[in-house]
Each structure stands twice: as C-alpha cells, then as structure tokens.
Amino acid sequence: MVLGETYTAGWLALIMGMLVIFIIIAIALYIYLSFAFTAIARKAKLKSPGLAWIPGVGPEIIAFQTSKMHWWPWLLIIGMFIPFIGFLFSITFAVFAVIWRWHMFETVKRPGWWALLCLIPVVNLVLYGITAWGEK
C-alpha cells in the first residue's frame, strides 16, 4: 500500500509542478501581449491603449479599434453560447479576428498578410513585438 501512495504522491507532484509552470508561462504571455498591443495602439493613435490589458479580449479590442470596422461581429460572441450553432459562430469570430489583425497591421504600416502568419503560435509573438517596437 505504501508503494501505491508513493506513486500517487509523485504523480500529484508532477501535475502540480506542470500546473505552476503553465500558470507562470500564461502570466508572462499575458504581460508581453498587453505591452505589445498597448504599443500598437499608441502607434495607431487610439484614445485608450490601456484596453489591451483587459484579460482575454484586450488584444481583440485593440485590433478591432485599429481596423475601424463595424461593431456587429462582437455579437458573434453571444452566439457562441447557443448550443449546436455556437461552433459556427466561433469559427466566424475567428475569421473576423484575422481580418481585424490584417487591417491593424496595415494601419501601423506593416504588411497585412502578417495576420495570416499570426496563426502560427510562436511566429505571432515575434510579429507582434516587431509591430509594437520595431522601427519603420
């Protein structure tokens, strides 16, 4: 019985350690993206660049504001909570997020096709950094 408890404690410690590492990485990414999108908002001369610090939707708000598109795609968020069709609303909202980023990059004098490269996980962090702090 003692051997089984040792394995259980070991697995629990491993899972907790991985959870702590995941949380630290998530907080670091949140801070990095918030600083980057705040800098992008300042380059785009938005009135409230601090909106980038809203957890979860801050970068989307900045991309939306710099694109100067209509507000109605935000209604898609409500549709995501409707059973069965929520998946379609989620896909549609993701498409609009790419379009907003395309216009955001063009607003701050970067190539719009970078929005497609932002679909690659690590590349997006590099491109946001270049857009925020790079010279043009």
Image (cartoon, grey):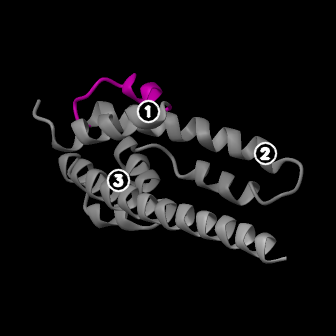
Q: Quadrant of residue 104?
A: top left
Q: Which residue is mark 2?
A: 87
Residue 56 is at least partly visible in this image: no
Q: Which mark is residue 33?
A: 3
Front label number (2 vs 1)? 1
Q: Residues within 10 Å of mark 1 (few under 14, many from 20)?
A: some
Secondary element under disc 1, as helix, strand or loop, is: loop
Rendered residue at 24%/37% (across/down): 131
What secondary structure is the magenta-colored segment mainly? loop
Q: Which residue is mark 1?
A: 118
Q: Residues within 10 Å of mark 3 (few under 14, many from 20)?
A: many
Q: Which residues lie in the magenta part? A: 108-119
The mark that comes first in sequence, 2 or 3, is 3
Closest to the observer, 86 or 117: 117
Q: How far apart in space, not on screen, are marks 2 and 3 (Cα)?
A: 26 Å
Query: Is residue 29 on the magenta stretch?
Result: no
Rendered residue at 20%/53% (across/down): 42
In percent of width and height, residue 14 lies at 60, 63
Front label number (2 vs 3)? 3
Secondary element under disc 2, as helix, strand or loop, is: helix
Q: Mark 3 and mark 1 in contact (Cβ < 8 Å)?
A: no
Amino acid type assigned to the residue bearing label 1 in the image:
Cys
The mark that comes first in sequence, 2 or 1, is 2
Task: Give left or right: position of 45 versus 1.
Answer: left
Amino acid type assigned to the residue bearing label 2 in the image:
Phe
Rendered residue at 11%/30% (across/down): 136
Closest to the observer, 48 or 57: 57
In percent of width and height, residue 134 lies at 15, 36
Q: Is residue 46 above or below residue 108?
A: below
